[in-house]
Image: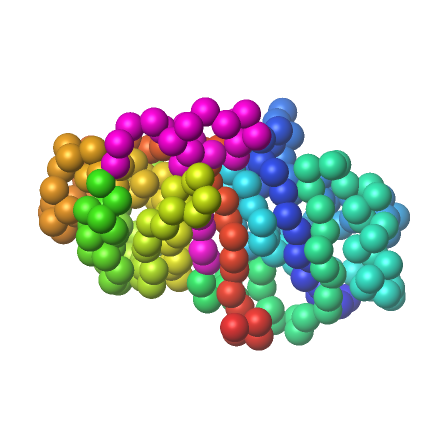
Amino acid sequence: MSRFFIQIKYKGTNYHGWQVQPNANSVQAEVNKALSTLFQEEILVVGAGRTDTGVHATDFFAHFETEKEFENEHVCYKLNCILPKDISCSKVFKVNDDVHARFSATERTYEYWITPTKNPFLIDGAYFFSHDLEIEKMNEAAKLLIRKADFSCFSKSNTDTFTNDCTINKAIWEEKNDVLVFTISADRFLRNMVRAIVGTLLDVGLGKIKPQEIENIIASKNRNDAGTSVPAHGLYLTKINYPTNG
């Protein structure tokens, strides 16, 4: 059996997240079905992680195994003919047997999009939030996130993680055209973590809390001390790094 990586993009609006689950459509189930149809055997992919209902991905990796020989470019073309219109295959390539889509990843990057004006073209792709925000203070608070720490305060409760320690390497707000974009990179993320961080930083931008209060929120390890989670449809997984792709 040889191991292959598949690089995909998907719009998460019509899916209950990445992971296969009973009685709900998922991205993983669609990719499994497409690969199984193409290779005429049962193929089960292992994803780089989970994304929640409504979350999008512009750069997602999964791995699968097969004994079949094929040309990678042709497989990608054929998969795009089978996959639903809101999921696309960018690349399929062979990797060493010990490379794992989830556990070999060294860093993940997310973006959260906010639009201050009603935009019908971003109805499923950005959070409509029309309040005035002090972006400088939001970035002041975001800098305080860059560290290795226990980020339980931003995690969904009752998860099965071994540790809530994460190392955040980047956290910044930028205005891009008519969209306010928050970019955050870390070695790993907890369930609901990015959306809870964004909600907390919006509280800073609204003047509800001071930037330095982020320190106390992190130290508390208490989800109730952080802000409300923002809607899922503004969140994008935009990059996953592995030792071989930098």
Residue at position x 32%, y 41% from top? 198
In terms of depth relative to the viewer, which is nearer, 89 or 48? 89
Q: How many marks?
A: 0
Q: Position of residue 181 (x, y in %)?
A: 40, 45
Residue at position x 63%, y 55% from top? 62
Task: Give the magenta range.
Answer: 108-133
Q: How is the image coloured?
A: rainbow
Residue 147 seen by the camera: yes
Residue 119 drawn in magenta: yes
Q: Position of residue 88 (x, y in %)?
A: 71, 46
Is 51 rendered above or below residue 21?
A: below
Is 80 rendered above or below residue 86?
A: below
Residue 113 seen by the camera: no
Residue farthest toward the front in the current orientation of the protein: 177
Residue at position x 82%, y 41% from top? 82
Is 77 rendered above or below residue 227?
A: below
Tell me which corner region of the image, top left, top right, bottom left or bottom right, holds residue 97: bottom right
Residue 195 as seen in the image, left or right of residue 81: left
Q: Position of residue 47 (x, y in %)?
A: 59, 52
Residue 13 as seen in the image, left or right of residue 32: left
Tell me which corner region of the image, top left, top right, bottom left or bottom right, holds residue 187: bottom left
Quarter of the picture containing the N terminus is: bottom right
In terms of depth relative to the viewer, which is nearer, 50 or 145? 145
Residue 186 drawn in magenta: no
Q: Position of residue 73 (x, y in %)?
A: 82, 62
Residue at position x 36%, y 28% from top? 129
